[in-house]
Amino acid sequence: MCGIVGYIGYRDAYPIVIKGLHRLEYRGYDSAGIALLDKDLKVYKKAGKVSALEDFVKDLPLTSTVGMGHTRWATHGAPSDRNSHPHSSGDRKLTIIHNGIIENYANIKETLLAKGHVFKSDTDTEVLIHLIEDIKTQTGLDLQEAVRVALNKVVGAYAIVIMSADEPDMIIAARKGSPLVIGVGEGEYFVASDATPIVEYTKNVVYLNDNEIAYIHRNELLVKNIDNTVQTPYIQELDLKLEALEKGGYDHFMLKEIYEQPRSIRDCLRGRIYPQQGKVQLGGIKEYVEKLKNVDRIIIVACGTSWHAGLVGEYLIEEYARVPVEVEYASEFRYRNPIITEKDLVIAISQSGETADTMAAIELAKEKGATIFGICNVVGASIPRITHAGVYTHAGPEIGVASTKAFTAQVTVLTLIAFYIGQKRGAIKQSTLIEYLTQLDEIPTLVEQALKSNDRVKEIAEKFKNSNNCLFLGRGSSFPVALEGALKLKEISYIHAEGYPAAEMKHGPIALIDEDMPVIFIATKHSSYEKVISNIQEVKARGGQVAAIVTQGDTTVKDMADYIIEIPEVNEAFVPLVSTIPLQLLAYHIAVMRGCNVDQPRNLAKSVTVE
Ligand code: F6R
């Protein structure tokens, strides 16, 4: 949450910073601000999108080769001009941008208020820059030391960048719990919450570790940890293409990402399955084969869409690897003293690799001795760095706030893990595995076919676009798909939607059904097909409008549902990968028809780095 970007070098900083903010806007978009250093510090900030800030500064002289910017997702203090970052010290000589939360800010603020500090905002961040100023003036320490001492006093999470009018040739960046990447150029450095603002200038990056502070000059990067010991920064090459960050002709990132799924699933499978040999290869976890052979419980922790992927994983792992699985909301798991032992395997799923609750759940499980695997999309993010082993999803950057291609890639990885463990434990026959892997190899093509339902889905969206409520129902592994369909619809179109196991409908939700209630069924021809048909009848008998996702050629459901969407025939194991596609499209079209901001839905942000 919140995007931060900084630059020091020989180029004009403003265009780099503002473009960087546009790239990071998915992280938060309620207000934005910049600071430039031209003799003295110039700070401009505005509530609203980055474009509002751009309009605000468009006629101002903005020359500077040092600058930074922030796009905010409010935690402390409502979105407003004055709560926007950067925040400055009382003497206006220091300014800071921050992503994270300073948990003990109230205590620090009280002490500073007693000393006469005057605050202009309601934020925790302003307290931190005043604390640095206070330490500097009270102790005579230089800025570097004052920042270090101040950071030792704060509790919470931060990624910060600081500029000083007295030190025009340096920016300071630091992280604890919130991500920060430094781009290394020739005579220039970039700092950002992720690599997207950096990739067009340099491919060489340093991922700052927790408790590290970087003192960045045009020709020098000095990294120390918070105890003042010098660290050797590890420079790595980015594997990120600029095209992946553009809309590429689509109206929205979300639509582009939905259409990318044949490619992203293919990338996720590449080099990992050998259908003819019946072999799954997962380099990231191969050291743990013995553990996997003997594991007697797997706990999956995640949030939101990633949690839905985890629920699909539960079905797959229990079915094909025959290991009991529990799926937990990371936010609940971390606060309820869960029973975990060294025998357990915990799988943490996260697109961003930065979700605060998921990270806290990992730390807790680690303390209790469990082995932790990560399933992440963003390479180099925090979660892959704190887990013992893991598997990247390789879906490419997901910019639309509503997760789409990351979900199908997560499910793909979980399918591979289920088969991998199943094979190692002898729970799945080799001939069966060959059969499954052969079809898994075909999934990108089947997803391509499912995307052809777009026009049909659009017609159905037209019918449902004015609804106030919507139910999504499925059984087995289609239940988490129903949950995911409901989440997609509610988060981007603001229609209230619920996902339920189809059989649960009669235990309550059936009371909601009337002629205004659209009910979306996942009714493919698999194990619970007949049961789902009965549930469809129950809805029809009460006047509900039924749209059903069915296996191509199905005539039974066609005769009873108001609308059907056909998807290609697929083995039951892979239904979630294909049936999710029309649900993503349905949410997308309804949101567009309702005039909603699809890529940046209200109140949301892509990386939830606060608990
Ligand atoms: C919904 C969505 C969120 C995320 C959740 C977890 O479309 O994107 O529900 O799935 O915030 O985020 P990650 O996967 O980054 O941990």
Image: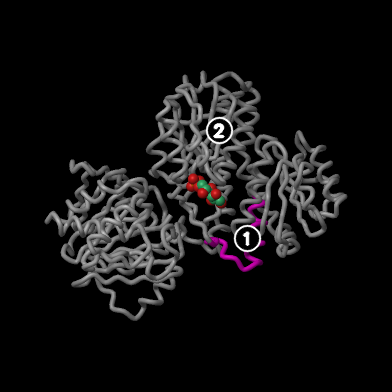
Quarter-of-image position of residue 412: top right
Magenta stretch, residue numbers? 581-602
Instruction: Give the crowd class for mark 1: few <14, some 14-19, many >=20 residues within 10 Å.
Output: some
How many numbered marks, from 0 up? 2
Badge 2 amino acid: Leu
> Ligand 1 near label 2 (Cβ, under 8 Å)?
no
Q: Earlier in the sequence, mark 2 or mark 1?
A: 2
Badge 1 amino acid: Tyr
Q: Label 1 belongs to which residue?
A: 494
Q: Residue furthest left?
A: 140
Q: Residue at x 60, y 44 (%)?
A: 444
Eye-nearest disc, 2 or 1: 1
For residue 588: magenta? yes
Q: Is residue 109 visible?
A: yes
Q: Label 2 belongs to which residue?
A: 416
Real-space CA distance between mark 2 and mark 1, rounded to the nearest whole angstrom: 34 Å
Q: Residue at x 62, y 27 (%)?
A: 318
For residue 526: magenta? no
- The x, y position of residue 272, in whole percent, is 51, 34
